[in-house]
Image: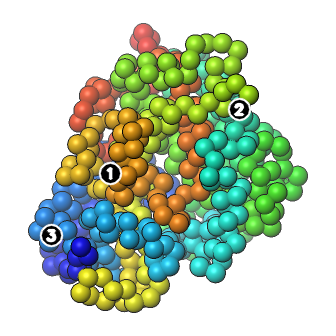
Amino acid sequence: MTRTPVDLTAPESARVMGRVLAPLVAQGAIVRRPRVTAWAERHQTDRAARAVLTGLRERHGGAPLVLRFGTRRLVVVTEPDDVRRLLEESPEPFTPATKEKRGALAHFQPEGVLISSTAERWHRRPFNETALQMGQAVHDEGAAFVDAVQRGVVELTRQLDSTGRLDAESFADVWWGIVLEVVLGPKAGRDRDLVELLGALRRDANWSWLRPRRPALREDLEARIGSYLLAPEPGSLAAAAHDCGPATAVGQVPHWLFAFDAASAVTLRALAVVASRPEVRERLLAEAGPAGPSPWQTAGRGPALLPYARACVLESVRLWPTTFAVLRDSTGPTPWGERALPTGTGFVIVSSFFHRDRERLEHADAFVPEAWLDGRNDADWGLVPFSGGPVACPGRNVVLLVTSHLLARLAARDLRVERGRYLARDPLPATVDHLGLRFRIAGSA
């Protein structure tokens, strides 16, 4: 049944803005602000947001919630059927190129497919799907990607053996080396100037339309990326992109790098759970198999798939989404129930609300990777770790390959995480600041 959207009262709108949307914006939609993410964990802002939306869903019978923000009309959905409609009917009549995304992402990827018009998507989307091999569980260059992961693990192991410690900052430095190798090739692995350029533009993007564009800085970023695309190294996404159309590639690569940064947070949180739960670690090690010359390979078929490790990564995204809200704008007048919503209406899917909805999910606040293996989670339209429908993330399998192999390898180190008692049992915290995670080798002081 299609429910007719209801206009929220002023107090209701204030609660949604203040306790649901404002904390998400404050943390930084494009790059996280460390002090705010720490504050969000202390106040468990996702738990508060879920309480507000659950109460409003009950009060209004699951109808979409309409609120005004200045001249902007936003519709917050609270039922999986409405999520399904928004995702299945994208990019028309619900475009992912929303006003908010265009304001933010244009700072560093003005030609990215996510903010492209419907006409532009006709060639940019197929390019991404082909270069990233969206339909394959393991990319043709997967062996090279896993080699990059292994080099990163060697570096992390060296740090751990030297200091006995691992924090988010040192992890991020190694992570960027892995990502640059996977995307642009081994020669790019130490190009931290590229990372700094991207970071500066992403910090601008947090302010969306409020921060002036810096075209010279963006041109420097594109030139640096373009230098690796001219003669791409084999075994990289740059090589696959070159084969699919080098002219399009330079406009899409910034988004691949941006998306991989979110995967860093996912991996750190998953690792924190592994470090807190011996039974999860043991299953990861069992899946990897006995130590040997190549325990991570499937004979003659490239990297092992590691389904349980992938499920652990997906469960990390479910519990602590890196995309705070999935956004859509209507491209024309939209009939919804007994109401017609005007062109340009914004629609909001709050990920943390749907991913932890106790009315639908028995395991809402529990770490249950098995629900990704037996199909329970895949059948639920409210669970959107990589979005869904025709505009679902085409890089899902590449990200899962890299993160699952990294997680499984790090599990072999038998780490412990500070404040691990909060992650050792269910229910799990609603908000976890990945930037504050700190690990040590088991047995070290």
Q: Position of residue 302 (x, y in %)?
A: 70, 32
Return the residue at label 2. 301
Amino acid on which disc 3 is placed:
Gly
Q: Residue furthest top?
A: 443
At numbered mark 1, what does the secondary structure look like: helix, strand or loop? helix
**Residue under the image location 74 percent in, 28 percent down:** 300
The quarter of the image holding the C terminus is top left
Asked whether the viewer can see residue 48, the reply is no
* Contact, mark 2 vs mark 3 (Cβ under 8 Å): no
Report, in whole angstroms, how far the alpha carbon at label 2 lies from the one at label 1.
34 Å
Rendered image: mark on residue 295:
none
Q: Quadrant of residue 143?
A: top right
Relative side of 405 to 362, left or right: right
Q: Which one is nearer the viewer's eye here, 259 or 192? A: 259
Amino acid on which disc 1 is placed:
His
* Contact, mark 3 vs mark 1 (Cβ under 8 Å): no
Q: Quadrant of residue 333?
A: bottom left
**Nearer to us: label 2 or label 3:** 2
Return the residue at label 1. 355
At numbered mark 2, what does the secondary structure look like: helix, strand or loop? loop
Q: Position of residue 420 (x, y in %)?
A: 33, 26
Q: Where is residue 56 in the image (x, y as percent from the top left)?
A: 16, 66
Return the residue at label 3. 61
Label 3 environment density (alpha carbons within 10 Å; few <14, some 14–19, many ≥20): some
